Image (spheres, rainbow, N blue to C red):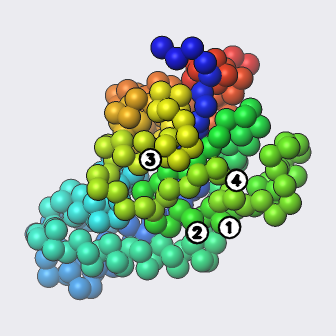
Amino acid sequence: MPTRGFEGAIFDVDGVLVDSPHERAWRDSLQELMETRWAGIRDRTSWAPDRFTPQVYQQVMSGKPRMSGAIAALEHFGVPDASARAEEYAARKQDMVVELIEAGQFEAYPDALRFVLAVKAAGIPTAAASSSKNAGLFLRQIRLDTFAEEQGLHYDVVRPGLSLLDFFDADISGRDFKQGKPHPEIFLTAASELGVAPEHCFVVEDAASGVQAAKAGGMAALGLARADDEQLLADAKADLVVTSLDQVDVALLARHELARRTS
């Protein structure tokens, strides 16, 4: 067991830091295709508008690179020639998500911003590590200095004009890795770029595949259940599962403990 506190904190982006439009884009772009270009195969699938639920997104697609997510969704709904159709689906989803981001159809989670500020103020270097190639678009638009002022938070780590993208000591979001989650490559790379051994890092994830990736890399896993999926994250062997990052005891990170606040 480590004898000192955590020295690195690694954050997934979608669903952890940002309430992103990815789920909406995946859902709406598939509906668009099923009602237009793919109308001829619709009756050969199990797809229906009401069957693309938040639970399907979380369990089938969340945390996966774009093409892997597209294939997983199409296979889930029994779409014929899923692998061949995935590129068209992924491209339409990407166009749609960029449109939504540029229209400001997303928001940062206040509990996440409070947590990353407190973690950094505690002297723990931070990294963003998302499979999404759109993560930088979100992070660049989120102003931490404005948020801290609105919340009455006073940290030395906040400076004028500070965006969430600028805040991180390392950002490896959107890179092409040979293997996606639950393989630990993305998190091991983040730890390496922070200059911290994996066993001294913790990962914040909202997807079971992300929790599995963290554990496979020898890291502690903090599961964030924003989608009523506490059991799913617990089954993936998260060291702690919370529904809000406000519930985490930041002081205990210095003792290498992931634990809930007692008050």
When asked about the image quadrant of residue 175, the answer is: bottom left
- As measured in the structure, the alpha-carbon distance from the residue carrying label 3 to the one carrying label 4 is 18 Å
Q: Residue 229: x and y, percent?
A: 43, 37
Q: Residue at x 41, y 36 (%)?
A: 214
Query: How dense is the environment of label 3, judged by Cα within 10 Å: few (below 14), some, or many (20 and up)?
Result: some
Q: Kindly check if marks 3 and 4 are in contact, taking CB atoms under 8 A apart as contact.
A: no
> Could you tell me which secondary element the residue under label 4 belongs to?
helix
What residue would you read off at disc 1? 141
Q: Residue 18: x and y, percent?
A: 59, 55
Query: How dense is the environment of label 1, judged by Cα within 10 Å: few (below 14), some, or many (20 and up)?
Result: some
Q: Kindly check if marks 1 and 2 are in contact, taking CB atoms under 8 A apart as contact.
A: yes
Instruction: Say if 188 sits above or below 143 in the image.
Output: above
Q: Earlier in the sequence, mark 2 or mark 3?
A: 2
Q: Is residue 249 visible?
A: no
- As measured in the structure, the alpha-carbon distance from the residue carrying label 1 to the one carrying label 2 is 7 Å
Total tally of numbered discs in the picture: 4
Q: Earlier in the sequence, mark 4 or mark 2?
A: 2
- As measured in the structure, the alpha-carbon distance from the residue carrying label 4 to the one carrying label 2 is 14 Å
Type of amino acid at the residue the image marks with label 2:
Leu
> Could you tell me which secondary element the residue under label 1 belongs to?
helix
What residue would you read off at disc 3? 189
Instruction: Say if 184 sits above or below 34 in the image.
Output: above
> Could you tell me which secondary element the residue under label 3 belongs to?
helix
Query: How dense is the environment of label 4, judged by Cα within 10 Å: few (below 14), some, or many (20 and up)?
Result: many
Q: Residue at x 58, y 69 (%)?
A: 137
Q: Is residue 169 visible?
A: yes
Q: Residue 106: x and y, percent?
A: 60, 64
What residue would you read off at disc 2? 137
Q: Which mark is residue 167?
A: 4
- As measured in the structure, the alpha-carbon distance from the residue carrying label 2 to the one carrying label 3 is 21 Å
